[in-house]
Amino acid sequence: MTTRIEADYVLETPGSPEAAAEAIAGEQSSGTFVTLPGETPELRERSAARVEALEVTGTVPQRSLPGRSMNGGDCTRARLTLSWPMGNTGPDLPNLMATVAGNLFELGQVSGLKLCDIRLPEGFAAAYPGPKFGIPGTRELAGVADGPLIGTIVKPSIGLDAGQTAAVVQELAEAGIDFVKDDELQADGPNCPFEDRVRAVMRVINEHADKTGKKVMFAFNLTGEIDEMRRRHDLVRELGGTCVMVSLNSVGLSGFLGLSRHSELPIHAHRNGWGYLSRGPMLGWDYPAWSKFWRLAGADHMHVNGLGNKFSEPDESVMRSARSLFDPMFEDKPCVPMPVFSSGQSAVQPPETFRQLGRADCIYAAGGGIMAHPDGPGAGVRSLREAWDAAIAGVPAETYAKDHPALAAALKAYAK
Amino acid sequence: MTTRIEADYVLETPGSPEAAAEAIAGEQSSGTFVTLPGETPELRERSAARVEALEVTGTVPQRSLPGRSMNGGDCTRARLTLSWPMGNTGPDLPNLMATVAGNLFELGQVSGLKLCDIRLPEGFAAAYPGPKFGIPGTRELAGVADGPLIGTIVKPSIGLDAGQTAAVVQELAEAGIDFVKDDELQADGPNCPFEDRVRAVMRVINEHADKTGKKVMFAFNLTGEIDEMRRRHDLVRELGGTCVMVSLNSVGLSGFLGLSRHSELPIHAHRNGWGYLSRGPMLGWDYPAWSKFWRLAGADHMHVNGLGNKFSEPDESVMRSARSLFDPMFEDKPCVPMPVFSSGQSAVQPPETFRQLGRADCIYAAGGGIMAHPDGPGAGVRSLREAWDAAIAGVPAETYAKDHPALAAALKAYAK
């Protein structure tokens, strides 16, 4: 286990990679662009960031990001690892962000920079909650011992009032769903106030649980200011709800920690806005680095998109993100959340998802893949469960479909 | 004044701009990628986002951002304005972010998307504090009635202990500085705990004020969790401090609001991390859109970089950002913060900065431009003030320098 904070980057520079690496290390610790009288050898020893590794991987004929001038011809790419002493920040997530992802992406020496991964000293493990529920706690509350939680999202995303939302949930509960979530657009708007929605939806969920013994897990989007989020969390818990949802990029780390330290329910962490953080191939964040902030801060469920999704993200990136969530952050505190697959999912993708994930510990969410099933939502949910059962049993979906009509109909309807 | 939420984008698409615009509007309101039974005309009327304007501006031979496939040939660029009804979110900044900057940058139809500006209905003005001090409040607390506040940053950025930091502040106070800030890397680390630093620095500042009548404004970086930030704010205020600083991208909107609603001091809003949000030419955020979230949430000072900076940002972008802060957000609540110029500044840039800004309402921060002045920090501060005095008086710096030796020495030392 590292005793210093470490961060891995992919760097591109029009100049010398060594000089660019030192410029980043200096800018992010005790140096600056001129030599300073106060920067003594003792101070540097105590506080300077170190270049731990720098490996040139190739050159590109054109810079990826514009600079003050576009001159420069070929640029060099390299893998870079920096480290910082704990004395600079202590185990402090918000200030860690300014250290590993602050004023470095815009440096003049940099024509591309992506933060790929971070590794943190043990001190961080003690300072933060991590997921309070994670995979086992979510399974217990949802009553799903094995296989994925089959999930969906209330649609239309926004526009339904509280009663209409509850009616949709009623239909989904009767269809046998395990998990439902609010859309990230739906929080506490005048057309569907949070409290009204929670009361109406929990009435449906509690009645269904009384009748069948199955309590659907509903992730209520409580995104808002700290005091609002805590109040909303308490309301959900009082009414017997089992999950809350929050938009990470809307509330930020300190906002999220204000909720997570208070929370007694699994937190469904929504990554909307992830596109602007990640879609530049040589700019911003890779998922393993970014998700570790939220994992340690207490995210129980984390979105990873899905195979064959409707967005621009390639399948390879989706699965790399999902698998990274299972990497333990610390020996005694792995901080493993449940990955959430979604976007354009149906009974078609489970075999490949399972094969690449290596396990079934996930929330597997489909919209049209459930609601638009030719035999209705009940068959939609069944078809997803059957597709996963087949994958876990190692049986080809087409074979399994022979005596599972819901799966058979889905494979026909959703074939690409 | 608009009655709907409006957002302006620059869009690039490999397909039809009309289709891409409708896809974004649908994804960010009541639509999705399949037609839904619940999406009634009445619901659409109530909740759908609208394409208010779409103007094709040209084509490019290659897509800016990768997608699931790189096919497509020419891409079209367009200016796009969308609007949303207030009924969806109400006046709610965190959820506004998910609406205007959520799951849209990664849409398959989009090969480039930048959020340029937003306009908000009056309801938002009543719901949020805006800057409590802004330009007049900052001037009053700093005792600077006219011209810029001449500022600097404690250097080395990190590594000094509390006593060493106070010694640097002593030197700067004696040099006649108006404003000093912590580095964004320096918050509450073991080597320089927040409380020790505040006590040591405020002793120096208060003694200097007692002696000279001038109280230097020091922005203490209190970035942290909500309760920590509030406690730290209270300590600064108790000891007679006049400013606190926070890293916006570390704490997030809900974290920031937890501080700003509590705060009784000007909030110096640091944008470190801005590079990953903005440096992709066809991805992410433009400053006017992004800064409006923080202006309305209560930022009193906002960073805008500087002319001839050491980063990659072009001068034109710096001045566009700075000027945008003076655009009123609402008729009765303009939410105008003080722009903060910094990075590689010296007595060289004030004339052009003033010419392009059209006013002197700013914090003008220099590091080497003060500390490395050939005649010492006192002459460094004087040279900056003289450069601004000359600019405001409409006198060429070289003329003014004839009987202002500090300026004369600076122009010689820092000439590019």
Image (cartoon, coloured by chain):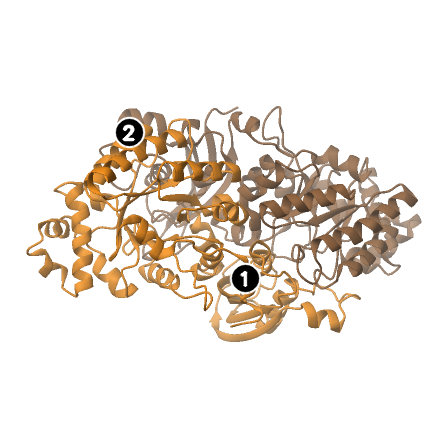
Chain colours: A brown, B orange
**Crowd class of label 2 (few under 14; some 14 to 19; many from 20; radius 10 Å):** some
- Tell me the residue at 20%/38% (across/down): B211
Residue B283 location in percent, x, y? 49, 58
Q: Amino acid at mark 1?
A: Phe
B318 relative to A7, above or below? below
Alpha carbons under labels 1 and 2: distance apart: 44 Å
Q: Secondary structure at mark 2?
A: helix
Left or right placement of residue A341 versus residue A19 in this view: right
- Tell me the residue at 10%/52% (across/down): B408
**Crowd class of label 1 (few under 14; some 14 to 19; many from 20; radius 10 Å):** some
Give the mark toward the camera: 1 or 2.
1
Residue A410 in sight: yes
Left or right placement of residue A129 versus residue A117 in this view: right
Which residue matches tag 1? B124
A81 relative to A400, above or below? above
Q: Secondary structure at mark 1?
A: helix
Q: Chain of mark 1?
A: B
Which residue matches tag 2? B164
Residue A316 location in percent, x, y? 62, 47
- Tell me the residue at 46%/37% (across/down): A95
Q: Amino acid at mark 2?
A: Gln
Q: Chain of mark 2?
A: B
Left or right placement of residue B344 versus residue B116 in this view: left
